[in-house]
Image (cartoon, rainbow, N blue to C red):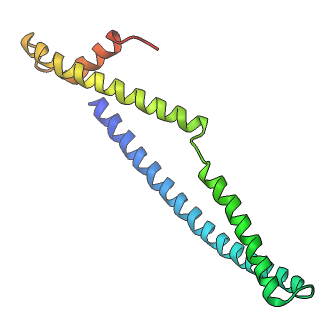
Amino acid sequence: MRTLSLARIAAQAEGLVLRRHARRIIVQAVMGAVAVIFVVCALALAHFAGWLALVSVVAPVYAALIVLGVDIVIAAIFGVLAMRSSPDRIEREAILVRDQAKQQLAIAAATASTLAPVARLMGLRHVSGLVIGALATRYLTPRR
């Protein structure tokens, strides 16, 4: 009974953690959206200021074309940098841990499904196959 109570408490705590995490992400997204609006306005003003500075040197059409060219070069640089993005060391390690956990879970499930009939034959009807599988997995699989 204590195990079920602890599992229920853990599930409730996990639900609370997930709700609070989702709320934090939503607040961050809203604040980020407001920041993006101000950055876009600042960039528009910087473009206008650059155009005004160029107009005193060249014709307005050429000033606009120069600003456009600079924008295309900057966009190309950031586009190339964005395409080169790859998983970092922490992400690769997390993927490895996830894959190992899934493999161990598959072994535990296979062990439980094979040992459950043996437990029933031995008269251990009250012992769950998962418990036997977990114990067998713990003691029969090699440690890393």
Q: Is residue 133 above or below residue 91?
A: above
In what quadrant of the picture does the N terminus appear? top left
At 7% from the left and 12% from the top, the residue drawn is 121
Q: Quadrant of residue 56?
A: bottom right
Image location (x, y in percent) of residue 53: 89, 83
Is residue 99 found left or right of 107 in the rendered image?
Answer: right
- Residue 111, image x, y percentages: 23, 18
Tally of numbered discs: 0
121 sits to left or right of 31:
left
**Residue at the image point whose x is 68% and y is 59% from the top:** 78
Whether 66 is drawn above or below 130: the answer is below
Answer left or right for 52 relative to 131. Answer: right
Q: Which residue is rendered at x = 73% and y = 77% of the image?
A: 68
Outermost residue toward the right in this view: 57
Q: Is residue 18 above or below residue 44?
A: above
Residue occupying the point 62% across, 66% down: 32
On the image, the x and y values in percent for residue 73 come to 73, 65
Q: Quadrant of residue 54?
A: bottom right
Say which of 111 and 128 sits in front.
111
Q: Quadrant of residue 45?
A: bottom right
Residue 136 point in image, percent of width and height: 28, 13
